[in-house]
């Protein structure tokens, strides 16, 4: 059997000991109960179950990524165990720990992505052919769930724009549509009509071409775990988390605004743009503050912070929406 030398652990892979020790306290506090909110980036509660859903330290195949310091925050990271155990991926169930538990039999290899629509180059491509020509980088982004909790996550991947430009979109390409795999035999949540499967998302093409838009193939210096959207997911740090579609199998350049899963399911609650906006509340809760799951702030109320417009990325992205009524175009 071939033996592989274990590479040095990158700084981003180290979970602070104090954070790990306080994790159980955090879970017990959450178990007291918070309102159950039904959207694609997570649910409060069900806390004790996730204690066993994910390992405490990073696991999986290492990925080399050069830190992009100019696009990374220096805020305390969310622990690996919470990034991988406190998430939501409705294709594997609606419970907080369901993605980690129910994705174990999901097979993300081999993987291919179809490129379609208004582009000079289209077709189906193996995942390795999509990102091997691009040097992988690590970006530490804030992640803001529409349910008013947030994380700080070190993703590994490459700019979405680098990929899209390779296929030479035409002048008719006004939007980019994304589709998740539909495989109910391995994604048990798809056997229930929670959403209109497969999951779909979309962006205006100028949003998709923005330097912050990122395609992740890893997290914490490892390949993406199944529950985090393996093997390819979108990361859009200025938007609510459900816009960052997971397990992508199709990217299409369209002329018309594409349908998106949560907007189609509840258009009065989830807009097409879904930019983080503390001044526009969800119909059922405030968006003015968020509970940060990171660093040592694991109390239910002690780590509540004010939400910033565009999740703190306004300087980079606000110009995309110049002249738009952000209350109407939420």
Image (cartoon, rainbow, N blue to C red):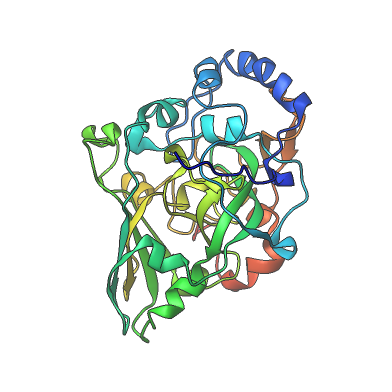
Tell me what residue is drawn at x 42 percent, y 51 percent.
245
| Percent coordinates x, y for residue 199 in the rendering | 32, 49
| Percent coordinates x, y for residue 195 in the rendering | 29, 41
Q: Is residue 46 above or below residue 279?
A: above
Q: Give the mark count.
A: 0
- Camera-nearest residue between 261 and 93: 93
- Residue 330 vs residue 259: left or right? right
Residue 103 lies in what quarter of the image? top left
| Percent coordinates x, y for residue 302 in the rendering | 76, 26
Q: Is residue 254 above or below residue 303?
A: below
- Residue 131 vs residue 29: left or right? left
Residue 301 lies in what quarter of the image? top right
- Camera-nearest residue between 303 and 111: 111
Tell me what residue is drawn at x 76 percent, y 31 percent.
16
Tell me what residue is drawn at x 55 percent, y 56 percent.
275
Residue 71 lies in what quarter of the image? bottom right
Q: Is residue 25 above or below residue 35?
A: above
Tell me what residue is drawn at x 49 percent, y 30 percent.
43
- Residue 315 vs residue 236: left or right? right
- Camera-nearest residue between 182 and 67: 67
């Amino acid at each position: 059997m071939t033996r592989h030398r274990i590479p040095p652990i990158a700084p981003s892979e180290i979970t602070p000991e104090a954070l790990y020790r306080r994790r159980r306290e955090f879970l017990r506090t959450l178990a007291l109960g918070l309102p159950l909110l039904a959207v694609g980036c997570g649910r409060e509660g069900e806390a004790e179950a996730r204690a066993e859903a994910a390992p405490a330290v990073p696991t999986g195949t290492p990925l080399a990524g050069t830190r992009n310091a100019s696009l990374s925050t220096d805020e305390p990271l969310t622990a690996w165990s919470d990034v991988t155990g406190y998430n939501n991926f409705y294709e594997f169930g609606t419970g907080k720990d369901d993605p980690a538990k129910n994705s174990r039999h999901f097979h993300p290899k081999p993987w291919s992505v179809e490129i379609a629509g208004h582009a000079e180059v289209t077709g189906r491509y193996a995942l390795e052919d999509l990102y091997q020509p691009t040097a992988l980088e690590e970006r530490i982004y804030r992640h803001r769930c529409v349910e008013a909790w947030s994380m700080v996550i070190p993703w590994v991947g490459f700019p979405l724009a680098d990929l899209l430009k390779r296929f030479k979109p035409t002048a008719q390409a006004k939007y980019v549509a994304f589709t998740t795999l539909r495989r109910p035999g391995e994604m048990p949540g798809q056997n229930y009509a929670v959403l209109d499967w497969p999951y779909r998302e979309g962006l205006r093409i100028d949003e998709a071409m923005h330097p912050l838009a990122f395609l992740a193939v890893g997290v914490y210096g490892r390949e993406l775990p199944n529950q985090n959207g393996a093997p390819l997911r979108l990361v859009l740090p200025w938007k609510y988390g459900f816009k960052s579609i997971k397990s992508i199998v199709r990217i299409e350049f369209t002329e018309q605004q594409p349908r998106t899963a949560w907007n189609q399911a509840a258009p009065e609650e989830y807009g097409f743009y879904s930019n983080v906006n503390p001044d526009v509340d969800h119909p059922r809760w405030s968006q003015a503050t968020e509970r940060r799951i990171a660093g040592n702030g694991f109390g239910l109320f002690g780590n509540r912070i004010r939400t910033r417009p565009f999740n703190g990325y306004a300087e980079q992205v606000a110009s995309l929406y110049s002249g738009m009524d952000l209350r109407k175009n939420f």
